[in-house]
């Protein structure tokens, strides 16, 4: 039943199962299996294998083909697979393949790869629904660093069909990205480099340029410390001079009238 389950998982359950009267088909376990899956059992007459002639013919064909490949040093399961593949790809008297009659389509064999006579139409269906990104275009690609979305700039160097591209990043790496992970970009590599801060560059002088500050920075450390100390002392003196004198008038306090009869000393 393990082999039957593998077959039924691909092709579905049959309506009728025709078999001989072997014990594996007449035991209670197989009866319960067929009953629960809605399969009708049919047994042939004892001693008359012609009733199930189609199965017997297939078994005889397989045995004859196995005798022809006895010289090949291959496992038995590979021999059976090759025989079945060739059998299903051989045209019948009506000109159709056994696989074609079952699947309603032709299966591809090695001759089709050597002499292709068909056109792939799936790409034509995909092409109008996708964005077009050409080789050499500037794009920005998605990157996830610590579960955070980042974008990196690069150039498309190779197209792998209509959905995937090889992108060379500005940092030198090459990555493979889906078209949904890319966006066209007008930012050129030279602009990114020119806008990036350099270690040797000096800060630009704005309108509120303070010459005293830069003169203070360029002085030696000893002079700078002395200057800061003098400035701090001068600021403290100036703060003390500029702060006004606050006068607070004390209020005259006297005890309540009901305490006049008591000695509070």
Image: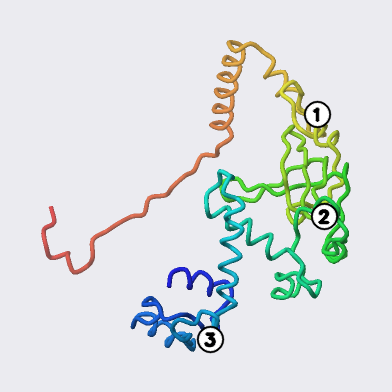
Q: Is residue 128 above or below residue 142?
A: below
Going by the picture, which residue comes out furthest to the left? 263
Task: Say if mark 3 contacts mark 1, CB within 8 Å.
Answer: no
The residue shown at (77%, 43%) is 166
The residue shown at (36%, 54%) is 251
* Nearer the observer, 125 or 209: 125
Task: Say if mark 2 contacts mark 3, CB within 8 Å.
Answer: no
Query: To which residue does mark 3 refer?
Result: 16
Number of residues whose C-alpha sits closer than 10 Å to that of mark 1, classed few (under 14), some (14–19) or many (20 or more): few
Q: Secondary structure at mark 1?
A: loop
Residue 195 spot, x, y in % from top left: 80, 35
Query: To which residue does mark 1 refer?
Result: 205
Which one is earlier in the sequence, the residue at label 3 or at label 1? 3
Which one is earlier in the sequence, the residue at label 1 or at label 2? 2
Q: Which mark is residue 148?
A: none
Query: To which residue does mark 2 refer?
Result: 162
Give the Cα separation between the discs numbered 3 and 1: 93 Å
* Nearer the observer, 238 or 68: 68
Which one is earlier in the sequence, the residue at label 2 or at label 3? 3
Residue 188 spot, x, y in % from top left: 86, 39
């Amino acid at each position: 039943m393990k082999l039957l389950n593998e077959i039924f998982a691909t092709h579905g359950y049959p309506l009728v199962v025709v078999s001989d009267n072997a014990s594996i088909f007449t035991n209670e376990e197989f009866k319960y299996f067929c009953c629960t899956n809605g399969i009708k059992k049919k047994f042939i007459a004892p001693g008359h294998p012609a009733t199930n002639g189609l199965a017997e013919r297939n078994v005889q064909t397989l045995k004859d083909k196995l005798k022809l490949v006895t010289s090949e040093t291959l496992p038995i399961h590979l021999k059976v697979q090759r025989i079945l593949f060739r059998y299903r790809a051989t045209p019948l008297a009506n000109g159709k393949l056994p696989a074609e009659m079952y699947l309603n389509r032709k299966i591809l064999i090695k001759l089709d790869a050597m002499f292709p006579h068909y056109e792939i139409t799936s790409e034509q269906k995909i092409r109008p629904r996708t964005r077009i990104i050409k080789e050499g275009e500037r794009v920005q690609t998605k990157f996830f660093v610590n579960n955070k979305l980042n974008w990196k700039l690069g150039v498309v160097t190779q197209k792998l069909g209509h959905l995937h591209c090889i992108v060379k990043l500005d940092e030198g790496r090459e990555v493979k990205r889906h078209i949904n992970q890319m966006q066209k970009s007008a930012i050129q590599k030279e602009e990114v480099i020119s806008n990036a801060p350099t270690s040797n560059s000096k800060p630009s002088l704005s309108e509120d340029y303070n010459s005293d500050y830069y003169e203070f920075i360029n002085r030696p450390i000893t002079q700078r410390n002395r200057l800061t100390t003098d400035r701090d002392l001068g600021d403290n003196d100036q703060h003390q001079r500029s702060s006004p004198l606050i006068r607070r008038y004390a209020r005259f306090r006297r005890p309540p009238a009901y305490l006049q009869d008591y000695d509070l000393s």
